[in-house]
Each structure stands twice: as C-alpha cells, then as structure tokens.
Image (tube, rainbow, N blue to C red):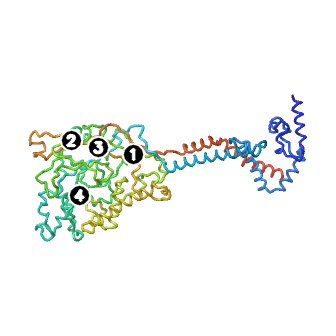
Amino acid sequence: MFEYHKNKINEIHSIPNNLSVEENLYFRDYYLKDFKYISPDVINLNKNKIINKDVEKPVISEEVEAKSVLEKWVSEVMKGLKQFFYQGSLHGVKYIFEPTFGSKEKATWVIIMFISIFICAVVIIQLFCKWTSTPFVNVIDSVPTPIWAVPFPTVVICPHLHVKKSHADVSELKGFGPNRTPSWDNGGEIEFFASLVCPRMKNENKFMENRLTDDQFIKLREFVTKGAPTCSDVIKACNWPALHDSRWEIDKCCELFEPIFTNYGLCYAFNSLPLNAMTNETLSWHRVFNKNATPAALEWGLDIGYPKVFPPDLTMKPLRVMASGESNGLGVELFLNNSEHQYACEGNSLGFTILIASPTDHVYTSTVLRLPMDRMTTIEVTPLTYKTDSSLRALSPYKRQCFFQNEKRLQYYEFYTDSNCKHDLWVQEARNKCNCVLFHWPRQYISEPICTTKVDFNCISSVKAKVEEQLIYAYYAESEDERGTQHESKSCHPSCNDVIYANQVFYSDLTRENTSHKWGTFKLGEVTKINVHFYDDMFLGQHRHAQYDDYYFVGAIGGLLSLFLGFSIISVAELIYFVLLKPAYVIMIDISSYS
C-alpha cells in the first residue's frame, strides 16, 4: 500500500514545470487536494520543485524586492478571498470557482446565487422597514394589576347653582342694557359677570366694551366666589373608609374637597393633587378661590408609581384604596337649596355635574355625568393603565408616539398628558395671540388680562380652532413616512405611562321618611347621594414594548442569512482569517525573511 502511494507521488512530481498547481488540480483520476493531507511532499509542491530551503530564500527575497508591500498585501488578500469563497462554509459559492465546471455550469450557479441573495435581501429589507416603521406593539398585560397600585380617581362635584339668589337676582339683570341696569349694577358689569358662569346666559354673547380694570377684576372674583355655594353648603356628609373606617363624617368633609375652577364654574374636587396638578407658578391664581392652596412635593408619579413599601401609606397623595366595592369607595351626601335656584341663570336644570378623571388630568373637559336629585347614584369605576418599557426611551417621541414625563414640560401643568398638553397649548396661544385668557383658565400672574370684549372672544374662538387644526396636521405629518426627518414632535401625543378611568352609572330612588335629618331639614328635591368605587380588585392594563429588540433583530437577520446563504458566525471567522489574518501573517514572514 505504501509503495502504491509512493508511485502516485512520483507521478505528481513529474508535472511539467511550466504549469502551476492551480492549473493542475487533477492528475489523472486523482484530486491533488486529497494528497495535501497525505504527503508533506505534495504540500511543498511548487512551480519550480525547489525542495532545498537554502535555495528558496533568495527566490522569496527576489519576489519581495520585485513587489511592494502594498502589492503583496493586495495579492494575498485576493488569494485569501478566493480561498474563502472556494473553501469556506457559504452555500453554493464554491461551485462558481470550481475548476472542473464549465462556463455554463458556473453561469447556472451564478444565477442561483443571485436569486438567493436577491430574495434574502428583499426579506431583510422588509424586516428592517417593519422594525423602523412599527418599533413597538401594544399588548394586554399578562399579569393583572391590583387597584391599590393606581390612584383613586378625582371626583369633581359641580352644583347647578352658580349664582345664589341671595347674592344677586339674575332675573333683574336679564333684558337690561348698559343704560337700563339696576341701580346696584354699575354699567352692566354684574350682568356680564353672571353671563360668565350662568349656563342659560352663555349663549347670549355678553361682553364688555373695554377690558376689566383692576377694581372690576376684584369685583368679578368676589362675584364668582361669593355667589357660588360653599363646600359646606352642598357637601353635608361623606364617607371615605381609608380615613374614617365605616363612619359617615359631617364636620370634616370639606377637608377632603378642594375648590377648583372648571368650565362649570366653581366646583369641589376630591383626591385632587396640590394646586390641582398645576405648576407652582399658578399659586397666586389658585389663592383667588382657595386661600389654603399650597404647593407640595409628591412621592408618586406616572412613570414611577407609588413607593414600594408595605404597609402602604393610605394618606399619601393621590389617595388610593386597598379593595373594591361600595364599602371601600367614596360616599357623599349632597344638598342643594332650591330657594337659591334661579331659572334665569340655571334654567330647568337641578342637580349636580360630576366629573370623573385622573388626578393628573385637568378638569376642563366635556365628559361629564349628570347627578339628579332624590336619587342614589352609584358609579362603578374600572381603571386602565398604559405602561411603556424603559427600553423605548432610546426612540424619539415622534417614533414611539408618546412622551415620558421628563421629555416635554408644560407651562401650566405639572404632569404631561395629552389633554393637559392641548389645554396648555390653548392657554399659551390665547395669551400670545389675544393677549388675554378666559377667567377660569390658569394664570401665572394674577394681573394677566381677562378676555371680556367682543374682539377678545372672537380671538379665543379662532385660537381654539387654529390649535385643533395644528394638532391634526401635526398628527398626520408625523404619521407619514417623512416623519423620520422631524427633530421635535409638535403633537400632543399621549403620556407613555398613564391611567384612565371608565365608569358605569346606576340610579335608584331615595325614600323620604321624614323631613328631619342629622345635619338639618330639607325639602323634596334638595338631597341626593353618590357612591364612587372600583368595580373589581384587579384589572388588566396595556403594555407598550419593542416589537423587535436588538437581540431578536440580529437573530432574525442571522437566521435569514443562514437560510439562504449558509452564512454564520463561523463564516465571519473564516472571512477574517482568509482576508486579514493569513495575508498579514504571510507579509510578516516575507518581511522578516527579507530582513
């Protein structure tokens, strides 16, 4: 057997000198590459058949002298690249360089490889476009959230009694012009004040000829605050189990409610944040209707939630409850003095307007509930949370379509939400374009002008329409493909972490046993009750996370390359070896041999 291989090796040595090894890969029926692993003589086979190493050194030296280092490097890189394609792990590429294949066979494999590379590139481009155009998905939480992890909603109570008859008889004002007003109405200013808060008079387009002076503004402030019923006038009893156990309180209810200005006049809010979640710059404006208003720091936030301590502090703002059900909710007994009701101001409406909102949202909203008299109104609330992975912070807001709290600061509101953003934009545009704001809108300075003239109100209407138009255009602009060129989002996207409340309302009649009550006497149609509580102990929120994280994206592309081309990490190692390491090693050997 040994003699047989020796004879074959002698036959290989008989190859003519004018042919290279690459041109003689086959000798009769034998493939020369097979003998590389059998005999060192075949490995050392070269064009000149020089075996003596002492004779080989001058030849190498002459080659190094004949070529520059750069030319030698390029030559070795091209050799290594050819060796990578021919001997590497890529599928099908070696058949293009197979010396035994004819031109038609090589052309066939070129077409096959082109089709495979084309399909692979198309699929990768589609995957990349999906990764960039839809970087995140919204899914339902796999684990339910307990209700003690979210705040109890803010409950705003607005009585349908904006001007008490004992304070000002609106019927004496209606129909009088500036020259035919009662003696106690100076030039019709009281009629204008009433038109700002009376629902029945808002459609009569009342306005002043000039802006309010400082004295007139003080009169307006006193008219609104003193004309409306106080907290103790309307809230007669309450029950908040987190503080009062199961007892109904009579004297301390107004400690839980804060006065607040809304589109519906002066209202009273339960579980409102300090300064009604507005910035400290609005403190002077808050003290117009709430002398006890003070700023305070919060340990809770939309992005961070409540502190993770047990047992939880139930007095921490915003308030929360540990369980659902009517016995764990807010119960309020409300009173409305019918003798103070004015048809000229309120119309036929009797009762209360209730707003259920997140403690971080403003209360200038049109989503309200009507609370009739002589009824027991039960409101079952179901929270819904929106959470966003912190990994999405790397994306710009216009790509993820939401803002974290530290990414967009509002001028009037402490917390960023989409509704706060819109109203903040309204107030800013009104102040810039009209040089005034509505009397119930937040202000940073108490001396800011109030919109009172016809020109002012027309300007406010145009500003509202313009802001809505700008927000719509900004939304569609950032939804198109060119949104990638935007540097700063101009839309009021939702907050990345937020909580909203859905509710169901149920009514039942109240029986009237006698006219005597523990807090006083009342007549028919003057009392109503309300209970607000969570529907269930647990709820499922929504979660926004990356559709493809970096590891998944790299794995998907790697899988496609492996499927179509057989490309893997080993292929990268082979490419580095044949194209970089091996040529560098050969050049170093040649240089060291020459020196």
Mark 1 or 4: in front is 1
Q: Which residue is mark 3?
A: 503
Q: Nearer the viewer, residue 347 or 489?
A: 347
Numbered mark located on residue 507 in the image: 2
Tell me which amino acid carries mark 2. Tyr
Would you place residue 344 above or below residue 517 in this image?
below
Which x, y percent locates residue 310?
Answer: 36, 38
Tell me which amino acid carries mark 1. Tyr
Which x, y percent locates residue 8?
Answer: 88, 35
Give me the C-alpha separation between circle 1 and circle 2: 30 Å
Q: Which residue is mark 4?
A: 289
Which x, y percent locates residue 168?
Answer: 13, 60
Left-right relation of 307 to 24: left
Q: Residues within 10 Å of mark 1 (few under 14, many from 20)?
A: many
| Marks 1 and 3, the one that precedes in the sequence | 1
Would you place residue 33 above or below residue 466 in this image?
above
Tell me which amino acid carries mark 4. Phe
